[in-house]
Image: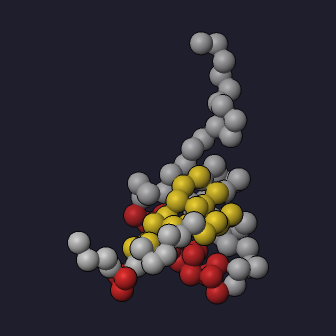
Amino acid sequence: MTGSHDEKSGKNVRMSRDAAVTANAVACVKQWRMAPKTPVACPYCGVPGVEIVDRSTRPIAEWYAFRCKACGLDDALAIAMPFHRPLL
Ligand SMILES: [Zn+2]
C-alpha cells in the first residue's frame, strides 16, 4: 500500500455524469462529422485534439468513444436515433 502512482494513465474522467460536458460532446461530434480532419476540442477540458471513434450500431443508436490525453477523458457518448425507434 505504499505505491502512490496511479495505474497506467491514472485519471479516468467520465463525461456522462455532467450534462454540460455531454452537451459539449454532442457539439464535438457534429463538428467532427462535418470536418473530420479538423482537430476537435475536448468536451471536458477544451484542449484541441480529442480522439473520437465512431462505434455506432446503426440504425439503433450512435456511439462515439472519446479519448483525451490532456485530461484523461475516456468515455463514450450514446445518441439514440429517434427516427429508427424499434417497435417493442
Ligand atoms: Zn480533455
Residue 46 visible in image: no
Q: Residue at x 60, y 61 (%)?
A: 66
Residue 43 placement (x, y as % from top left)? 57, 65
Q: Residue at x 67, y 72 (%)?
A: 40
Position of residue 14 relative to residue 4, above or below, is below
Residue 45 placement (x, y as % from top left)? 61, 59
Q: Toward the viewer: 88 or 17?
A: 88
Q: Toward the viewer: 72 or 75?
A: 75
Count of numbered circles on the image: 0
Position of residue 11 relative to residue 49, above or below, is above
Q: In the rendered view of the protein, which quadrant contains the C terminus?
A: bottom left
Name the image quarter holding residue 38.
bottom right
Position of residue 36 relative to residue 52, above or below, is below
Residue at the far left in the pictured view: 88
Residue at the far right in the pictured view: 37
Residue 5 placement (x, y as % from top left)? 68, 26
In the picture, measured across the screen, residue 87 lies left or right of residue 61, that is left
Q: Residue at x 53, y 77 (%)?
A: 27
Residue 1 placement (x, y as % from top left)? 59, 12
Q: Residue at x 64, y 66 (%)?
A: 53
Residue 16 visible in image: yes
Residue at the far front in the pictured view: 88
Please say which color scheme the image uses.
secondary structure
Q: Toward the viewer: 8 or 80?
A: 80
Position of residue 9 relative to residue 29, above or below, is above
Name the image quarter holding residue 36.
bottom right
